[in-house]
Amino acid sequence: MRYILDKSCRLRGWTDHLACLERTPGRRVIDLSVREYGLLSKCDGLTDVDEIKYAEAIKVFTSLGMIREADGTELDPAQKYLFYENRRFRNIDICITGCCDFRCRHCFNAEENDRSRGTQPTTKKLIDLIARLDACGVANVTFSGGEPLLHKGFIRLAEELNRRDMRFVRLVTNLYHMTPTLADTLIGLGHRPLMSTSFDGLGTHEWLRKVEGSEKRTLDNIAMLKAKGFRVRTHCCVWKDSMPVIRDTVLKLQELGVDEFRIMNVEPSLRWRANAGGQTIGITEWLDFVCDLLDWWYDRGINMELDVWSFWRGAAGSRYINIIPDGHCSYEREDKIPVCADAYRTPYIDSDGRIVLCNAVTGYTKAEGCDWGNVFRDDLHTVLREGPFIDLCTRTVGQMKKQNPMCMQCEWVRHCRFGCRAEALAWGGDLNAPDKRMCVFFKQGYYQRFMEIADRHGLVYER
């Protein structure tokens, strides 16, 4: 009997995932076993398949609509096995411009900042980058900045993603320049990216962003986007003077239909220290605030996804939560778990082409002259396969423990995942050191308090 792949399926491989099946639309990827790949590689409509040897796999893939009996139709060449000479990175965050017209007190892209990364690649240069990312098997793209809506080629870039069947998964924007027409244009192109925007408190947002009228416009555009069916995530930075308004802010955002609420204290970046260092919330003060917020959140039954950056995550309406620093359930696999999972999932390309772990480290790495690879200068397959960036984003929890022998003597060594690399840099000045917040979290009883909060509200977490 002969079989053929469904038109939605194509065989793909990367240096670290050799046998995969990619399905369109959406370009979702499934890892294949040796036997599964052995079957699918023969499903070209021309090759006889051993139905006894592959009986179970044939049954599964037929039921999923991935293969069918051959009917004389030829296999599209694009469906045949394609090997990408790089590691498998399915998501990329592209800073399409370092320019921004906001003057945020903590951001290196602020308009008034002399040290701003205010570079802006041409539309042609970015279209070429998208093509090369596609050639590396990247399927999902985030556009960020600076303020991405300031780039005159923004719509052309969205069109290019559509042409290549690449998903526009997220737009990181201050929403100041979002309009109903622009939202409709994205919908017309088949894009409904998660709208990720900053909202930093009722009555306090404009103090941080330093743009008059930005608070009202952000709230108005959140309402407009929700009415058009977009998912919205708000990122709330907190400093000493904004702490009292956070609960009212949460209620307002829930009223507007915001889907995800992410909150963090402003990290002591170089620019923040110069502009508002006295407003920095200390680690214990922040964790005490978070404990009170969690109790209030679940008492009120807030119906948004909650992400307390680096510490707690809970889906809307779900009893299941994740106490993020606690990695004890993965202890036996610590030599395989990347210490910076976000970078491993979604590398960040700065507007000058530098590839870094995330947006939060761009200011430091620029100031220090760090060069982990540049997508406008270097071969992209190589950048995504080997070298300093790959060494950083694949560094494991186990390797970090070996680099930090003091941690091996800690009673919490089986739990701690070393925290966020950007926070380690901000609080301790060392990318390869433990995130000091995690030391406080475990050693000063906050882990126990988090578990007690979860138990008090009937929440389920890994123990």
Image (cartoon, rainbow, N blue to C red):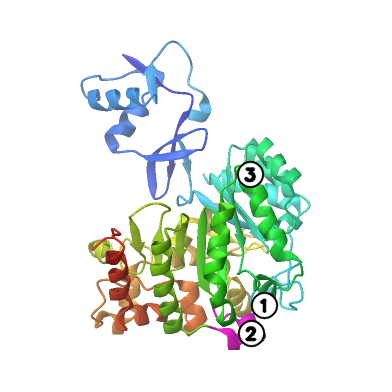
For residue 106, what is the image quadrant? bottom right
Element on which disc 3 rests: helix
351 in relation to 423, above or below: above
In primary-sequence order, the first of circles 2 and 1 is 1
Q: Farthest top residue?
A: 72
Spatial CA distance of label 1 from label 3 is 31 Å
**Callout 1, which amino acid?**
Arg
Magenta span includes 275: yes
What is the magenta range? Answer: 267-280
Kindly identify which numbered label has been placed on residue 227: 3
Left or right of 390 on screen, residue 350: right
Answer whether labels 2 and 1 touch (C-beta < 8 Å). yes
Residue named by callout 2: 276
**Residue 422 picture location, percent across and down:** 50, 73
The label nearer to you, 2 versus 3, is 3
**Residue 272 picture location, percent across and down:** 62, 81
**Callout 2, which amino acid?**
Ala
Give the camera-side residue of 223 and 411. Answer: 223
Q: Residues within 10 Å of mark 3 (few under 14, many from 20)?
A: few
Q: Which residue corresponds to the image point at 33% horizontal and 81% vertical from the top-left?
A: 404
In primary-sequence order, the first of circles 1 and 3 is 1
Q: Farthest front residue?
A: 300
218 in relation to 18, above or below: below
Q: Main secondary structure of the magenta part?
A: helix
Quadrant holding the N terminus: top left
